[in-house]
Image (tube, rainbow, N blue to C red):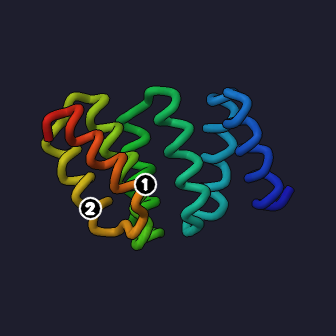
């Protein structure tokens, strides 16, 4: 099975709430294609939704390295940090996201997180 077919299956698993299956599928993809950012994004999202925040942070870090202009790995890393009650690193991650986003809706989400968490 090629990477795109596995990705489609992993995404469907994620969408269906089968997070353990999605996580394993995305792990396989990351192992087979370690330089493909969207596979790391899927792994990170699956781990975050599973509340495996420390593991998700590692995957978000790889995604941010592979997709240097994408603000979303930093934004979602901030969510993980906040779930771990780590406001300092969350604030830094939000700053990185904000520097990379021309996207007004994301800027609004960043401002909302800062307001809610007093960052």
Coordinates of residue 61 in the picture (x, y in percent): 37, 56
Coordinates of residue 29 in the picture (x, y in percent): 66, 54
Residue sitting at x 51%, y 27%: 50
Residue 82 lies in quadrant: top left
Residue 31 lies in quadrant: bottom right
Decide: is 68 above or below 59. Answer: below
Mark number displayed over residue 68: none
Please tell me which of labels 1 and 2 falls first in the chain: 2
| Of residues 115 and 79, the one drawn nearer to the viewer in this rendering | 115
Q: Is residue 116 left or right of residue 79?
A: left
Q: Residues within 10 Å of mark 2 (few under 14, many from 20)?
A: some
Residue 115 lies in quadrant: top left
Marks 1, 2: nearer the viewer: 1
SS at circle 2: helix
Give the spatial CA distance, label 1 vs label 2.
16 Å
Coordinates of residue 46 in the picture (x, y in percent): 56, 38
Q: Quadrant of the N terminus?
A: bottom right
Q: Is residue 10 left or right of residue 48?
A: right
Q: Which residue is label 1 attached to? A: 105
| Of residues 54 and 107, the one drawn nearer to the viewer in this rendering | 107
> Disc count in the image?
2
Residue sitting at x 29%, y 41%: 112
Q: Residues within 10 Å of mark 1 (few under 14, many from 20)?
A: few
Residue sitting at x 61%, y 56%: 39
| Of residues 111 and 100, the one drawn nearer to the viewer in this rendering | 111
> In this view, which residue lies farthest toward the right?
1
> In this view, which residue lies farthest toward the bottom?
69
Q: Which residue is label 2 attached to? A: 96
SS at circle 1: helix
């Amino acid at each position: 099975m090629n990477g795109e077919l596995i990705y489609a299956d992993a995404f469907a698993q994620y969408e269906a709430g089968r997070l353990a299956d999605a996580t394993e599928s995305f792990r396989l993809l990351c192992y087979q294609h370690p330089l493909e950012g969207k596979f790391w994004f899927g792994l990170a999202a699956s781990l975050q939704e599973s509340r495996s925040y420390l593991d998700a942070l590692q995957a978000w870090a790889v995604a941010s390295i592979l997709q240097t202009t994408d603000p979303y790995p930093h934004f979602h890393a901030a969510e993980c940090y906040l779930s771990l009650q780590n406001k300092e690193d969350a604030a830094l991650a939000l700053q990185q996201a904000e520097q990379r986003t021309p996207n007004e809706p994301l800027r609004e989400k960043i401002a909302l997180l800062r307001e809610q968490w007093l960052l």
